[in-house]
Image (cartoon, rainbow, N blue to C red):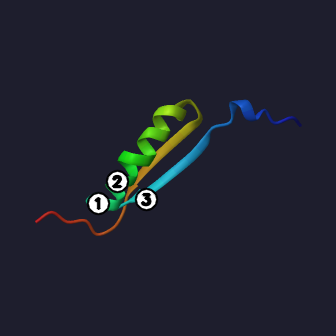
């Protein structure tokens, strides 16, 4: 069979801590700009993970 990679979509799952400064920085500086450019080729699933607490 022939696989047409021109129509391929990459599935990206990101596990992150909601209040973690490094997670926020990654989403703002890397994930969002990449997704903005490649949204037709990416499915992004964001999964909040960890022990974030608000006092």
Q: Nearer the viewer, mark 3 or mark 1?
A: 1
Which residue is nearer to you in this view: 34 or 51? 34
Q: What x and y, as percent, mark residue 49?
A: 36, 63
Quadrant housing residue 21: bottom left
The numbered dot on residue 45 is none
Q: Quadrant of the N terminus?
A: top right
Q: How many marks?
A: 3
Residue 11 in picture, x, y percent from top left: 58, 45
SS state under label 1:
helix
Q: Identify whether 35 is placed above or below 23.
A: above
Q: Are marks 2 and 1 in contact (CB under 8 Å)?
A: yes
CA distance for labels 3 and 1:
14 Å
Q: Quadrant of residue 32?
A: top left
The residue sitting at the bottom extreme is 51
Q: Which residue is mark 1?
A: 21
| Mark 3, residue position | 15
* Residue at horizontal 38 percent and vertical 49 percent from the top: 27
Q: Secondary structure at mark 2?
A: helix
Q: Quadrant of the C terminus?
A: bottom left
Calculate the distance from the C-alpha at mark 2 to the C-alpha at mark 3: 14 Å
Residues under numbered marks 3 and 1 in contact, where contact means CB atoms less than 8 Å apart: no
In the figure, is residue 2 to the left or right of 51? right
Q: Residue at x 49, y 44 (%)?
A: 44
Q: CA distance from mark 2 to mark 1?
A: 6 Å
Secondary structure beneath label 3? strand
Residue beneath disc 2: 25
Give the mark nearest the N terminus, 2 or 3: 3
**Mark 2 in CB contact with mark 3 (< 8 angstroms):** no
* x 34%, y 61%: residue: 22
* Rendered view: 42 above or below 29: above
């Amino acid at each position: 069979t022939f696989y047409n990679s021109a129509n391929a979509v990459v599935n990206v799952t990101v596990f992150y801590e909601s209040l973690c400064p490094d997670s926020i920085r990654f989403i703002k500086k890397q994930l969002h700009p990449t997704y903005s450019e490649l949204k037709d080729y990416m499915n992004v699933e964001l999964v909040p993970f960890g022990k974030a607490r608000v006092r």
